[in-house]
Image (spheres, grey):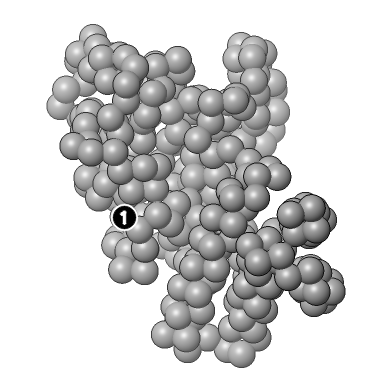
Amino acid sequence: MTSAAVIATYNGEKYIIELLQSILNQSIKIDEVVICDDLSTDNTRELVNEFINKNGLESSWRLLVNEKNLGYAENYRKGIKSVNGDIIFTADQDDIWEKTRLENMLAVMESSDEIGVLNTDYFEFSDNLEEAIQIVNELSLDNFINLGKVKLNAKNRFLKFPGCVMCFRKDYFESIEKHWFNGWAHDEFLWCVSVLDERCFYANVITLLRRVHEGQTSGKIGRDRFKRIKYLEGELKCVNKLIEIAKEKGVDKKTLKIYQKNEKATALRLELVKERKIFNLFKLLFLLKYYNSKKSYLVEGLMAIKG
């Protein structure tokens, strides 16, 4: 079973070397690493090339540079399609891999062919990396890996783990790629479809130190009305696709109902924010379980009322 890591970079000069070093320092050697750069305007590419050459990694590590800016989702898609490993790990440019991440996750993947996508725990930090590593090492001393399947419900319809803690089978990805539409983030796509397929699993082991900082691509939507509209439009497109897949697979009525109720709630939320249909607040009271966060009900209500 071969392994590959895909790193999507864009102006990541500040932290990229720490990530690359953490992958190089794994307890077992990774077979392939592809860094896909989306036309960074800083020194990211130069630093990556220098790291590869300095460590003699030219035979297994590659830097790909896009001809045009693809954006976050399509940059990852290009990277995923560029690797040959049986098990693919997606990595964010500013995180740190725990030293046994690769070894532990490959062992879990080898334990069952049923696992299409595997998610793990992570530890968030902001400033002191050494302190964070020490804490993770202490937490991991007696960390028995308990594996469980992620079951579909109103909450698990939404992405629960960032892509940086995922790995997945290449052949499973290839079997579902036809459903991936342009702009659908790779982690949300893999999570949503694998939960529907009953091939999404979670292991309670910390495998990653996730850096929290202002410059992250995956920022919060907050109270920006236009960002919220764009987000809800994306969510509506996502759930419509999931309904299409569910019908294609002939799922039971209970499963289909989860997606249909989520579709109804998302459409009402979009009308509320975009068209300021205040009466939708009353309708949405009966659909709160189909929100990723109930706080969004209040935020979106204020957006509509304030105008």
Relative to residue 42, is residue 188 depicted above or below? below
Residue 163 lies, in percent from the top left, at: 49, 45
Q: Is residue 262 left or right of residue 6?
A: right
Question: What residue is drawn where x is 67% and y is 36%?
Answer: 143
Relative to residue 282, is residue 95 depicted above or below? above
Q: Is residue 86 left or right of residue 282?
A: left
Q: Which corner quadrant of the image does residue 283 belong to?
A: bottom right
Residue 139 lies, in percent from the top left, at: 70, 28
Q: Element type at marker 1?
A: helix
Pick whichever, 33 or 145, lies toward us.
33
Question: What residue is drawn where x is 41% and y is 22%?
Answer: 12
Would residue 92 be seen by someone viewing this image from the given angle? yes
Question: What residue is drawn where x is 58% and y is 38%?
Answer: 219
Q: Which corner quadrant of the image does residue 138 belong to?
A: top right
Pick whichever, 272 or 35, lies toward us.
272
Tell me the residue that label 1 is attached to.
170
Amino acid under disc 1: Lys
Question: What residue is drawn where x is 80% and y is 58%?
Answer: 305
